[in-house]
Image (spheres, rainbow, N blue to C red):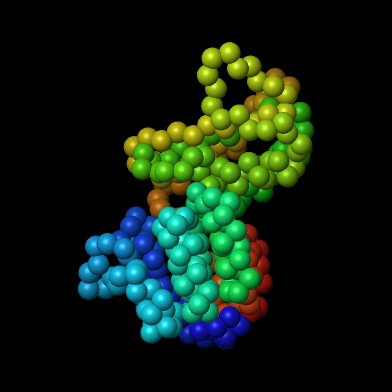
Amino acid sequence: MSAGDDVRGRPIRIAITGATGRMGGELRELAADRDDLNVVLAVARSGQGEEIEDAADLPSLLAERDPDVLVDFTGPESSVEYAAACVEAGVPVVVGTTGFSEEQQSALEDAGESIPLLKAANFSRGIAGLRRAVREAVAALPDYDIEVTETHHNGKRDAPSGTANTILDDIEAERETTGRVHGREGDQPREAGEIGVHARRAGDVTGEHEVLLAGNHEVLSLTHRAGSRGVFAAGALDAAVWLAGREAGRYDFSDVIGGSDER
């Protein structure tokens, strides 16, 4: 399947990487219950079974199974590798992995020159609403102090989370700041214009993000809590359906929520 092909009127053929992982399992389970999707390929680096292929064979499997789009929630290194395979096969890709280095981010951007590539730190519609609310609040309260706190399960590797970094980018787009201060220890009074950033890792917390704005003897707290990884998997599958058949380019989840259905 090449970019620009007409996929309307039939189920979207998807490939899933990291199929034995937490998000991979959620994606496979939810996709099986949808009439608009057909999982034609699932790969993983380990734990292959009857329905799980070896990720090392992804380039040849993409040519053989001919998916309309690939969905990836793995790790930065493997995501870049899989995106490169998608470029060679002409397969659009949805990337939900976070924690990329600048070099890896650049590699993904380059891939988006050849195929449709949709990358997002979070596929929750609630987070999309939170981001809009944060931008409006920051613009409306220019002199208020800001603290951003995120909490995730004890197995999450990158900190702050990709979603928190996206929210911080939104804040800095609305207001001139003096930088981000990660945690506080010892004699460290708040300076005007800084953003406090805090990352917590505990238990099996799926994901919580809070933006606190304080000033003028009042506090505004904007918070989102995800109760299940299924929230993110459902959004990523919506993104896959939306992305299939589009022209090459870099897209974001906001395009899915507010974008046109025309391809």
Residue 36: percent from the left, percent from the top?
Answer: 45, 77
The answer to whether any part of residue 133 appears in the image is no
Q: Is residue 64 above or below residue 184?
A: below
Please name whichever residue, 68 or 12, is drawn nearer the observer in this view of the structure.
68
Relative placement, left or right, of 214 versus 154 is right
Relative placement, left or right, of 102 versus 27 is right
Q: Outermost residue toward the top?
A: 187
Q: Which residue appears at 46% of the width and 43% of the height?
A: 158
Q: Quadrant of residue 32?
A: bottom left
Q: Which residue appears at 54% of the width and 56% of the height?
A: 104
Residue 163: percent from the left, percent from the top?
Answer: 55, 47
Relative placement, left or right, of 208 versus 202 is right
The C terminus - image quarter: bottom right
Q: Outermost residue toward the front?
A: 103
Residue 122: percent from the left, percent from the top?
Answer: 52, 53
Q: Which residue appears at 63% of the width and 41% of the height?
A: 168
Q: Which residue appears at 30% of the width and 70% of the height?
A: 54
Please name whichever residue, 151 or 75, is drawn nearer the observer in this view of the structure.
75
Residue 130: percent from the left, percent from the top?
Answer: 60, 46
Q: Is residue 158 above or below residue 21?
A: above
The answer to whether any part of residue 54 appears in the image is yes
Number of dots carrying numbers = 0
Q: Quadrant of residue 231?
A: bottom left
